[in-house]
Amino acid sequence: MSKEWVPGLEGIVAAESNISYIDGQAGVLEYRGFNIKTLAEHCTFEEAAYLLLEGQLPKPQELSDFTDGLVANRSVSDSVIGMVKSFPKDGHPMKAIQAGCAVLGAEHPIADLHDSGEASKAIARLISQMPTIIAAFFRIRNGQEPIAPRSDLSHAANFLYMIDGEEPHPVIAKTMDVALIIHMEHTMNASTFTGRVVASTMADPYAVVSSAIGSLTGPLHGGANERALANLRTIPGLDQVDELIEGKIQRKEKIMGLGHRVYKTKDPRATILQGLVEAVFEVKGSTPIYEIAKRVESIATDKLGHKGIYPNVDLYCGIVYDRRVIPSYLFTPIIAVARVVGWLAHWKAQIIGNRIFRPTQAYTGGHDLPYVAPESR
């Protein structure tokens, strides 16, 4: 067996999967064989979630039953709300939802992971209650009481409603719906791999999702979208973009929102998000930061395109949420609201014919070292 070390496991095949597919050279992302652009144009969050979890688009009754199951599980217990109220008010909401998911597992233990009924209940509970926990934490940290979920709104619209108590404009609700779809799944990324490793131990889906959330928290993964908007905001105006960005390129500094481990062309999700920005502007008005972002893209394409460095999903992501007056610390939790579907799809796949992950290592230490007493060290 080869003991060659590959940093970051780049190029190492960790699992077989028919859940999603990426062609980084062509800029293609597919869910179960459906192009992400097709799904973003035609599907709802609920339809896309069913597709990832069940392997096919739902028939009308299947979609109705699935949606009803999600709606019925939106409310969280008083004990979970009490726990959320006990969190530090200045803590990051990712910590809150990670703990919240773990508590859900304590409240709803699963006796048999292979029981389809128990699995379906856990899946519905995790997908439906994560937005409720996030919205509750957001309001509590701002001195407000949580808003109970509504049963007459879509998954995306209800999430926005629980944040500020206002039923969102249809365009804004659709924008959030599409944003959730395109963030739902992305093959063997860090958080999904984390979740599959935990799933391989036959831990329950609550532990799987909680572990994946911990991975998503990192600034090199889900947290990158917060930093991308923050970096755009440091650029005073459109007339200074060229000087600042070209300076970063010359100094070989990382520019958040550019480049991707897999995509060597423009991230297809960035293209979709850019279209959403323009739709949101029609309702909420435009912002100068969008012009700055487009100029950053233009410079990067010209100067770095030959290296395969193009805009990723983070460049325009924050701008979409910013026009809905969603604070940047909620950007990564929004990804979790979407990605929980992908994590659970991978959980279902992992426990079928499961084999625990147990990679080897390239040892670089010494051998058979002599013990030296403390007084002689």
Image (cartoon, rainbow, N blue to C red):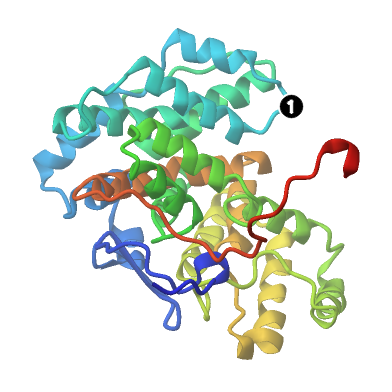
Residue 35 at least partly seen: yes
Task: Residue at 50%, 47% (x, y): give it.
Answer: 335
Choose between 282 and 172: the one closer to the eye.
172
Q: Disc count in the image?
A: 1
- Considering the image in quadrants, where does the C terminus appear? top right
Q: Position of residue 287 (x, y in %)?
A: 70, 57
Spot occupied by residue 59 in the image (x, y as percentages of width and height): 10, 47
**Nearer the observer, 204 or 216:** 204
Is 152 placed left or right of 66 in the picture? Answer: right
Quadrant into which the N terminus falls = bottom left
Residue 169 makes an appearance in the image: no
* Badge 1 amino acid: Asp
Q: Nearer the viewer, residue 41 or 222?
A: 222
Seen in the picture, residue 7 relative to 168 is either above or below; the reply is: below
Tag 1: Cα neighbours inside 10 Å, few (<14), some, or many (≥20)? few
Residue placed most toward the observer, 244 or 108 = 108
Residue at the (27%, 64%) spot, across then down:
16
Position of 252 with respect to 215 (left or right) is: right
Single out the residue that lies furthest toward the bottom. 306
Residue to which mark 1 is pinned: 90
Query: Residue visible at 54% across and 53% down?
Result: 280
**Is 66 on the left-hand or right-hand side of 329?**
left
In terms of image quadrants, where is residue 164?
Answer: top right
**Tag 1, which secondary structure?**
loop
Residue 32 rendering spot, x and y as whole percentages = 24, 62
Residue 34 lies, with reference to residue 332, above or below; the image says below
What residue lies at 11% left-to-right and 44% top-to-bottom? 60
Examine the rendered structure and indicate whether residue 351 appears above or below residue 203: below
Q: Position of residue 25 (x, y in %)?
A: 45, 83
Instruction: Locate residue 296 relative to residue 208 in the image: left or right.
Output: right
